[in-house]
Image (cartoon, grey):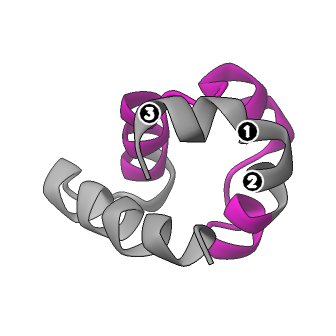
Amino acid sequence: MNQDTLRGQWMQLKGTIRKQWGKLTDDDLDRIEGETEQLVGTIQERYGVARDEAQRQVDAWAPRTDR
């Protein structure tokens, strides 16, 4: 999923993001607004994982949302 797709479908994807990363708050999602880097950084912060791990999680999640 590219950045434009994420931004364009942000409202629809917020629910699946909350299912995947339940520690993210509505305020987090409002602040992220479809920006991949913001999503990765917030996952890193909330879950205490390295940036590479957060990016891997987002990359693994993103293709499933295209189905």
Picture quadrant where residue 66 is located: bottom right
- The local secondary structure at tag 2 comes to helix
In this picture, is 59 found above or below 24? Answer: below
Q: Earlier in the sequence, mark 1 or mark 3?
A: 3
Q: Position of residue 64 (x, y in %)?
A: 54, 78
In the depicted view, which residue is nearer to us: 35 or 50?
35
In the depicted view, which residue is nearer to us: 33 or 44?
33
Residue 33 placement, left or right of 52: right
Part of the protein shown in magenta: 16-44
Q: Position of residue 52 (x, y in %)?
A: 15, 56
Q: Earlier in the sequence, mark 3 or mark 2?
A: 3
User: As shown in the figure, which amino acid type bears the numbered disc 3?
Assistant: Gln
Q: Position of residue 59 (x, y in %)?
A: 33, 63
Question: Residue furthest toward the front?
Answer: 67
Which residue position holds label 1?
10
In this picture, is 31 found above or below 3? Answer: above
User: As shown in the figure, which amino acid type bears the numbered disc 1?
Assistant: Trp
Q: Say which mark, if any, is on residue 50.
A: none
Q: Answer yes or no: do the residues labelled 2 and 1 have beta carbons within 8 Å?
A: yes
Which residue position holds label 3?
3
> Can the viewer see residue 49 in this picture?
no
Secondary structure mostly seen in magenta is helix
- The local secondary structure at tag 3 comes to helix
Which residue position holds label 2?
13
- The local secondary structure at tag 1 comes to helix
User: As shown in the figure, which amino acid type bears the numbered disc 2?
Assistant: Leu
Mark 3: give few (<14), some (14-19) or many (20+) Cα within 10 Å. few
Q: Position of residue 48 (x, y in %)?
A: 35, 57
